[in-house]
Amino acid sequence: MAKNLSGDLQVASANRLADGVVVWLDDAGEWTTRLERAAISRDRRSGEILLRRAEAEAFAVIDPFLVAVAEDDDGMIEPLSLRERIRASGLTFDAIAADAVRYA
Amino acid sequence: MKLFSDAGLPATYVALPFADWRTRSDWPAVALANTDPVEELAAHVDRLRLVVLHFPKFSDGRAYSQARLLRGRLGYRGELRATGGVLQDQVAFMLRCGFDSFESDQAGFGEALARARTVFSVVYQPAEDGRAPVSLLRHERRNAALT
Amino acid sequence: MPDAHFYRYDDYDRTLVGERVEQFRDQVRRRLAGELTEEQFKPLRLHNGLYLQLHAYMLRIAIPYGTLSSRQLRKLADISRKYDRGYGHFTTRQNLQLNWIRLEDAPDALAALAEVDMHALQTSGNCIRNVTADHFAGAAADEIEDPRIWAEIVRQWSTLHPEFTYLPRKFKIAITGSPNDRAAVRVHDIGLRLWRNDEGEVGFEVIVGGGLGRTPMIGKTLRAFLPRNELLAYLEATLRVYNRYGRRDNLYKARIKILVHEVGVERMRADVEAEYAGTRDGLLGLSSETIEAIAHQFAPPDLPSRPAVVGAVEALKLGDRDFALWLKSNVASHRASGYAIVTASLKPAGAPPGDASAVQMEGVADIADTYSQGELRVSHEQNLILPHVAVEDLPAVYAALGRLGFAEANVGKITDIIACPGLDYCALANARSIPVAQRISSHFASLARQHDIGDLKIKISGCINACGHHHVGHIGILGVDRNGVELYQISLGGDVDFGRTALGTIIGPAVTADKVVEAVDAVVATYLDVRNDGERFVDTYRRIGAQPFKERLYETV
Ligand code: HEM
Ligand code: SF4
């Protein structure tokens, strides 16, 4: 599956003010918790525009920024950096809560 | 900038920058940067009517120490004004360090200032506002219990 | 329920903490309403222990001087269940971190904490942080005086200190009352060590300018002997010098260690003493009455007389090898005959170090009630301590901890790993820490092997900020990021023991994540080959240097 790894593709992300949850800006200018709905900019200039749009919508989020992503043939996007992949998909190990019942 | 002051000196009262004031230290009002040595005011505190201390950012806390030295160590009793990053969430600390006048443009600052002395009814440290720290209150309470 | 034998809030303390919660509630409301910018709000939330991490807010709750009652621990479990995901992380600075807090809920969580006389005040931000102390305080056999008395005095003085809330950078104070420093006083901004001089008086050695982070430094002695009642006036003088002259132009050079380093300890001492001449006769002098009133609350519990040698314990020791190992590594001597100090290991094989679920917290609280006077401690090695356990009860405590998964006989051993949250949680991280710790811990799970290897401390940080203390690990592991790939730098020979505090040396190029276990294995194998009888890992390292370890390691990975 060919990946576009050029780093030109970007989405805008932030943490939601009220609860800190990771969100992305969608095409309608709403913040969504679903990465697959994120608006994608495909070159540097539209990246800047995307960031400006995000900043204009930043009332209920904290410090928006751009995230470089890759897109596969099916249009699935995935952040390039490990940090952003972890932000998108959560802890990479089982938090203790998952097996807390074991001790009960 | 809006001035909030108990001391009654008008906002137009001109405080000289420290470097200028040094050349004519009979002038009763001086403005210090937070790196200027307050110690040099020692010989003049009785004559000074206004000292202005500056917070370049609200998060740069050097002027708190300058204020305490002026009040506590040097015994300055004139107006002590805070300028720069003066926001309502820090004003209680400023009052405790001996400031009695504030320049601030923040909405709601005046109301916050009026409330600031009562947000915390208890203080743990002696500072420059004459409030009795908890250790002293406990001491008095123990003595009262004994008599 | 036995009453706790440590400081209890009076109405003044309660009033202050309550007012603080309400102040923060108002600040949160103003932030949510858009009246405060993030820049203005951030220091306010940090001063209340609220960070923003990768996935959510994190609340850092202070456990002052690491002392906790069973009732408080139950409340923490409760709060983690109600406002978080049912678990928490005990940190190296005697705090508890909850990783999934909502800003909207934070004031309620803080109000719930206040119900058990706890708070999250000054657990972050550029202020005087939660004061830490020896986790065996009040029980250790080698203690000169209970350091918690002083930590409480400092806690009160530093709480909402009007002059020192916007320092150049954070400020950490640690206190030990024993010659065997278990509080790492040489790597704090100020470390205080109680000792008795030739005249028989007890006072503090004041150590300044230690710290880890990106510029690790060992603290220097500012005052060899400070009479106890002068403590606050002296601290105030030191903090004032720092507040006025500490650097503010560069975040990374703003800690007091840099000031001390740049001006030299002699000049620092002269400045502090000059300032002190002005503060010493003020209101900060501590009357013996004030000290007594606080000391009184830390008076040790009345421990009923219990036998020092118990047949059943001896029998179990012979019959159960794991129990025998546990006695060796997790049980320390208590100053009262017939009693022992038990460490509950929060490092079961393969688990995230220092984490406990709400159910586990409640389980430990129950054990503390039945067997340890309702008292607990949190260690800077991220374990929980039961400070007053009768020798006779050790088998029962072992079994009960075992049911919680906390009876691993590994305290001080290779799987008693300190790891920071790393890239799984932390917004500043370069690499993950916890999964690395889990892999090492699973690999070395055999207790017999761990005890054969002996004392060996592994400390892991996910970036140069060094929250995992990697600089002072016997084996230190630092995660770095090279072009998007996680690599780990290995250092050897660090130590925090008093008198031997040392920073580790990086031994060569960083290794990839999948090679970390092999690298550690190679280091351990080298040690096992060349050690003398009874020689600890660090001592072997000091004797033979890095070269043999290095050769073996880079042959392997
Ligand atoms: C996940 C959120 C955390 C963040 C954002 C964070 C941030 C930082 C930063 C920026 C520093 C360096 C400060 C400096 O040197 O000026 C630092 C140091 C430190 N942190 Fe953390 N930390 C976090 C979690 C922890 C945890 C979980 C622990 C305990 C296990 C911890 C304990 C420490 C310690 C002991 C230092 C020591 C270095 C020193 O102060 O000299 N931190 N932290
Ligand atoms: S060492 Fe770095 S990665 Fe680890 S918790 Fe501290 S700041 Fe985060």
Image (cartoon, grey):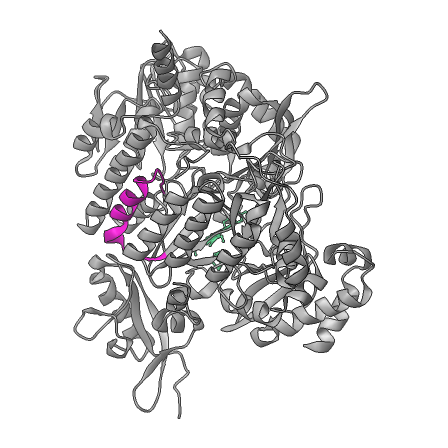
Viewer can see residue C129? no
The percent coordinates of residue C265 (x first, y second) are: 64, 33
Q: Residue at x 55, y 17 (%)?
A: C277
Please tell me whether residue C108 belongs to the stretch shown in magenta: yes
Q: Is residue C486 left or right of residue C527?
A: left
The part of the image, by quadrant, that contains residue C476 is: bottom right
Residue B31 in picture, x, y percent from top left: 36, 25
Q: Position of residue A42 (x, y in %)?
A: 30, 80
Q: Nearer the viewer, residue C333 or C511?
A: C333
- Residue C325 among those drawn in magenta: no
Residue A5 in the image: above or below residue C462: below
Residue range highlighted in magenta? C99-119
Q: Is residue C100 visible?
A: yes
Horizontal arrangement in the rendering, residue A101 relative to residue C138 (left or right):
left
**Horizontal and vertical percent for residue C354?**
49, 57
Quadrant containing the N terminus of chain C in the rendered view = top left
- Along the viewing direction, whichever of A21 and B104 lies nearer the viewer: A21
Residue occupying image coordinates x 47% and y 18% = B40
